[in-house]
Image (cartoon, helix red, strand yellow):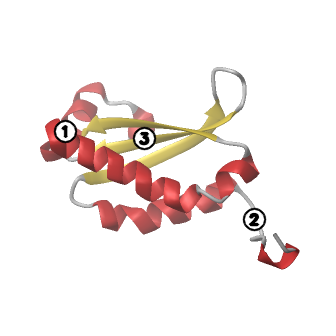
Amino acid sequence: MPRSKIPKPPASLAVVMAAAVTEVLPLLAPDVVRIRWDEGVDWAGGRALHVRVLLDDSARSGARLMQAAGRAQAEIDARLGPWIPLYQLQVFYNYRSVSEQAQMKCPEWE
């Protein structure tokens, strides 16, 4: 690929992910209520991105759950795609419903 065609990487993964979340959240409503994420390491010590998707209770089971989860992952992956190899990331997705979060009260999901 000619050097001029290689996109200049943003300053940080945080910039990329914040833009991706801002862009996809309206597309995923009303099934997806919130998306949170953090950087960490995977089981082998590699760089990881942990994405937490909070689903509306109406999308928490059956075919609608599969559709909402698949769409959320596809939309985020589409925006992260060029940056995953650059940042050497493994992306992990977790899903929870609003009612599950109300019971569990995990701060990282807020």
Q: Which residue is mark 3?
A: 52
Amino acid marked by disc 3: Arg
Closer to the camera, 105 or 7?
7
Q: Which residue is mark 1?
A: 60
Residue highlighted by disc 2:
9
Q: Is residue 98 above or below residue 25?
A: above
Question: From the viewer's perspective, is 70 left or right of 18?
Answer: left
Instruction: Please tell me whether mark 3 sits on a helix, a strand or a loop.
Output: strand
| Residue at point 32%, 66% (across, down) | 27
Q: Residues within 10 Å of mark 1 (few under 14, many from 20)?
A: many
First in sequence: mark 2 vs mark 3:
2
Image marks 2 and 3: residues in contact by CB distance under 8 Å: no
Pick the quarter of the image with the C terminus: top left
Could you tell me which residue is drawn at 85 percent across and 74 percent down? 2
Q: Nearer the viewer, mark 2 or mark 3?
A: 2
Q: Quadrant of residue 63?
A: top left
Total numbered labels: 3
- Tell which residue pokes out farthest to the left in this image: 58
Q: Amino acid at mark 2?
A: Pro
Q: CA distance from mark 2 to mark 3?
A: 24 Å
Structural distance between the alpha carbons of marks 1 and 3: 14 Å
The quadrant where residue 64 appears: top left
Label 1 amino acid?
Arg
Residue 78: x percent and y percent? 51, 59
List x then y, in percent, for residue 37. 51, 44
